Image: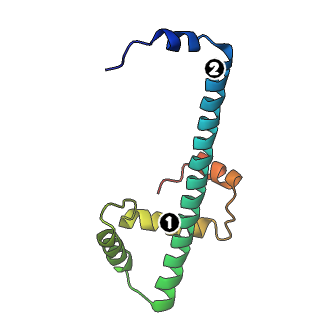
Amino acid sequence: MERAPTKHQQILSLDTNYINFLKDIKEKLLKSQLRVARAVSQGTVQFYWELGKELIEKQKAFKWGEQFLTQFSHDLRMSSPGMQGFSVRNLQRMRQFATLYPNLEIAPQTVAQLMGVCIIL
């Protein structure tokens, strides 16, 4: 339960300098949160692409059969129980992603373009 503002707090909330300072901090916080979200998105897209590429390469090089993705998905999820996103279907999508973009170079603009294409992993 929030307390009623004190007289000092009421006066402070009317101070133009205080209002501008609070506004500036809110804007900086929002910009920072957006930068972090973009960086995370960029890293995630890069990781999914690299994993897709490696899945293709390893399966081909070592001649792992059709059940490779099923086993890999199971083992990966068992080693990290709280982690999501590594179902067989998602691993197939990662391979497809690597196939569709064989020479992917990740940059913030690329991530934004890919998000517009709605690649769901």
Mark 2 and mark 1 lie on one chain; the one further toward the N terminus is 2
Numbered badge on residue 33: none
> Could one spot residue 13 in this view of the protein?
no
Mark 2 lies on a secondary structure that is helix
Q: Going by the picture, which residue comes out furthest to the bottom? A: 62
Image quadrant where residue 80 sits: bottom left
Q: Which residue is mark 1?
A: 94
Up-down: is 16 above or below 67? Answer: above
Q: Going by the picture, which residue comes out furthest to the front? A: 8
Q: Position of residue 37 (x, y in %)?
A: 56, 47
Up-down: is 11 above or below 108? Answer: above
Give the crowd class for mark 2: few <14, some 14-19, many >=20 residues within 10 Å: few
Type of the residue with mark 2: Tyr
Q: Position of residue 27 (x, y in %)?
A: 64, 31
Numbered badge on residue 18: 2
Image quadrant where residue 15 sits: top right
Residue depicted at 43% across the width and 67% down the height: 91
Up-down: is 44 above or below 17? Answer: below
Disc 2 to disc 1: CB gap under 8 Å: no
Residue depicted at 51% across the width and 14% down the height: 9
Residue depicted at 68% across the width and 53% down the height: 108
> Could one spot residue 81 in this view of the protein?
yes
Marks 2, 1: nearer the viewer: 2
**Of residues 83 and 120, the one drawn nearer to the viewer in this rendering:** 83
Q: Position of residue 31 (x, y in %)?
A: 64, 39
Type of the residue with mark 1: Met
How many numbered discs? 2
Q: Position of residue 67 (x, y in %)?
A: 34, 79
